[in-house]
Amino acid sequence: MYRVVRGKISTLSAGEFSPALISQAPQGARRASWLAGRALLSRLFSPMPDLVYSEQGKPRFADRNEWSFSLSHSGDDIAILLSDEGEVGCDLEVIRPRANWQALANAVFSNAEHAELERTPPEQQLTVFWHIWTRKEAIVKQRGGSAWQIVSVDSYKLIDVSLSHCQLDTLSLAVCTPTPFSLTAADVQVLG
């Protein structure tokens, strides 16, 4: 089973949290998204299980080994992919202008990913850049890797996982799952 839930960081992070959770929250720019992620998890699991972190920082449940999840955020949006079928990864990005995106694509995209970008009309290339980027990030997250490993990922050469993508208005959302899952906008539940 796969479940994708999306929400707004500004709304979710404004809720009430236990003092213990507040004390764990990072300070600075990451605080609101961190709290919003915990708010999503607590709505899906009540009470929210304890979390532990991999060497690369990927959170997982300490005592619910049957459940895997992946969180991603961009702008004021946050998404979680929940699974009872194995490790998963998701990436969410606001489709937005990015300085030097072509140079970034040259640095991290595979030949097949470049070909996809080059087949795209120029006015749609920035959107396709974000589609490819989110696919690559979802794969890295599914593997539990770090963002620096994105250069070694080719979203066209997958053997043991399934990759799916959808666009939600100005958001690009990709998921990487251990079994086939064809993500559509209708699959994404929206929470406040």
Image (cartoon, rainbow, N blue to C red):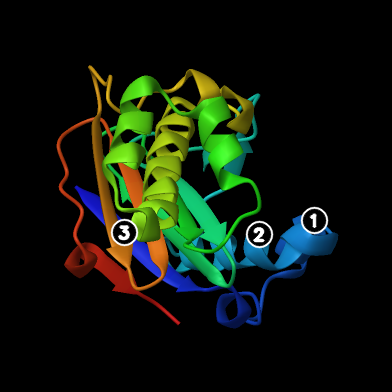
Kind of residue indicated by mark 2: Trp
Determine whether 72 is above or below 156 in the image.
Answer: below
Q: Within the image, what quadrant is residue 162 found in?
A: top left
> Looking at this view, is 83 or 18 the one in front?
83
Kind of residue indicated by mark 3: Val
Asked whether the residues under the numbered discs 1 and 2 touch, taking CB atoms below 8 Å apart as contact, a structural biologist would say yes
Asked whether the residues under the numbered discs 1 and 3 touch, taking CB atoms below 8 Å apart as contact, a structural biologist would say no
Few, some or many residues within 10 Å of mark 3 (<14, 14–19, 20+): many
Q: Is residue 44 visible?
A: no
Tell me residue 183's x, y (percent): 20, 53
Residue at 27 percent across and 57 percent down: it is 166
> Looking at this view, is 5 or 17 the one in front?
5
Circle 3 residue: 4
Circle 2 residue: 34
**What distance separates the C-alpha of mark 1 from that of mark 2?**
7 Å
**What distance separates the C-alpha of mark 2 from that of mark 3?**
18 Å
Circle 1 residue: 26
Tell me residue 191's x, y (percent): 40, 77
